Image (cartoon, grey):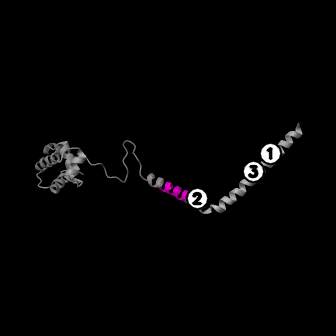
Amino acid sequence: MMSLRKEILTYGLCAGALVTILDLTEYRFLVVDRSVEIYGALIAVLFAGIGVWIGLELKRGHPRSLAAGSAPANRAPAFLCDQDRLATLGITPRELETLSLIATGLSNREIAARLFISENTVKTHSKRLFDKLGARRRTDAVRIGKESRLIP
């Protein structure tokens, strides 16, 4: 019984060695025949890894959110609108929103699209806003809005 186990183990080891040798020779032919493709794939994997690493490093510099009550050291304090001046002038929240979009340089059509209202409604808001601020054109309204601390 012992000799049968020995024979099976010997034949198994020889068969394993033979399969390993055949695989190595096949691998050598594969490397010789397809060396350009293998090197190209290795370089592609290397650059993909470098790209992922750079992306993670760049993203690490921009935190997604801040803990409640903490402000970043390099940012200016948040802008606070002068609510008293806003109430004195009688400017509605929609007119203030229109003024802030005018200050960003958007056209009436772009403001209408952003606020989901018609162009005529934007013109009405703008006209009422100009009357309340005493402005004749958009640039005057933005200047007065900034001076009055209505927009940043």
Residue 112 in view: yes
- Is residue 36 magenta-colored? no
Amino acid type assigned to the residue bearing label 3 in the image: Val
For label 1, the crowd category at 10 Å Cα-Cα, with few meaning under 14, some 14 to 19 and many 20 or more, is: few
Which of discs 2 and 1 lies nearer the camera? The answer is 1
Q: Are marks 2 and 3 in contact (CB under 8 Å)?
A: no
Residue at mark 3: 19
Q: Quadrant of the N terminus?
A: top right
- First-in-chain label (3 vs 1): 1
Task: Report the front residue among 86 and 115.
Answer: 115
Q: Main secondary structure of the magenta part?
A: helix
Q: Find residue 12 and name its label.
A: 1
User: How many numbered badges does the structure rendering display?
Assistant: 3
Q: Which residues are magenta?
A: 44-54
Residue at mark 2: 42
Report the side of 12 relative to 59 (left or right): right
